[in-house]
Image (cartoon, rainbow, N blue to C red):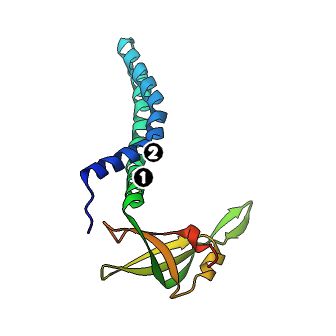
Amino acid sequence: MTTISIADKLNFIFESFKKNAAIFLFTIPFILAGSIVVYFATQADEPFGMYVFGITFIAVPLLIILYTFPSSFMYYYEQAIAKKYGYYTKATIIDKEIEDVSYTRTDGGSVITIKNYNYIITYVFDYKSVTYSNSFSVEDKTVFDDLKLKSLIPIKFLRTAPGKATVLIRNLTKKK
């Protein structure tokens, strides 16, 4: 198993922060405005309403950051790792499943059925004498139908964590 150097980890962290800069830049004006309102609340005769408004103006963006940032950060961090340590190979399709997620809704007294399906494909690949299995879904039924059991599909996985693999979906639609 390949180990990732500290310098590489720091570069990946920096890349992830750069990709997430928009989240922070978007929230700065709200936090500044909320801070100004809280400051003026300390000077006011009846500050309760201003405190509530200012703290809310600060808390909402902070909660958004706390909610979205960890997953977004990890996504871009893992993307940077895959870019450097990713390895391409072929995987074998072992199972195909159509999951019916259709639902009904009422519209003006009439019931409408919305047909919706998930097309799930399971594949396996070997790396260093260990077999790994994973699944992915495709949105296009024609791509799902074109992929046959036992056929090979292109994937990219991390040599540092072979269980983390992604299917190169754009390459699935290319003619062989």
Image quadrant in which you'd find residue 17: top left
* Mark 2 neighbour density, 10 Å: few (under 14) some (14–19) many (20 or more): some
**Residue 10 spot, x, y in % from top left:** 30, 47
Left or right: 75 in relation to 115: left
Please give the name of the residue rendered at 53% of the width and 72% of the height, measured from the top-left corner. 137
Please give the name of the residue rendered at 25% of the width and 62% of the height, measured from the top-left corner. 3
The secondary element bearing badge 2 is classed as helix
**Residue 140 spot, x, y in % from top left:** 63, 72
* Amino acid type, mark 1: Tyr
Q: 77 or 52: nearer the eye?
A: 77
Q: 58 or 50: nearer the eye?
A: 58
Please give the name of the residue rendered at 52% of the width and 69% of the height, measured from the top-left corner. 168
The residue tagged 2 is 19
Task: Give the total of numbered labels.
Answer: 2
* Amino acid type, mark 2: Lys
Q: Are marks 2 and 1 in contact (CB under 8 Å)?
A: yes
Left or right: 10 in relation to 103: left
Cα distance between the residues tagged 2 and 1: 7 Å
Which numbered dot is residue 20? none
The residue tagged 1 is 76
Q: 89 or 59: nearer the eye?
A: 89
> Relative to residue 172, is residue 70 depicted above or below?
above
> Relative to residue 151, is residue 117 depicted above or below?
above
Upstream in the sequence, badge 2 or badge 1?
A: 2
> Relative to residue 88, is residue 60 depicted above or below?
above
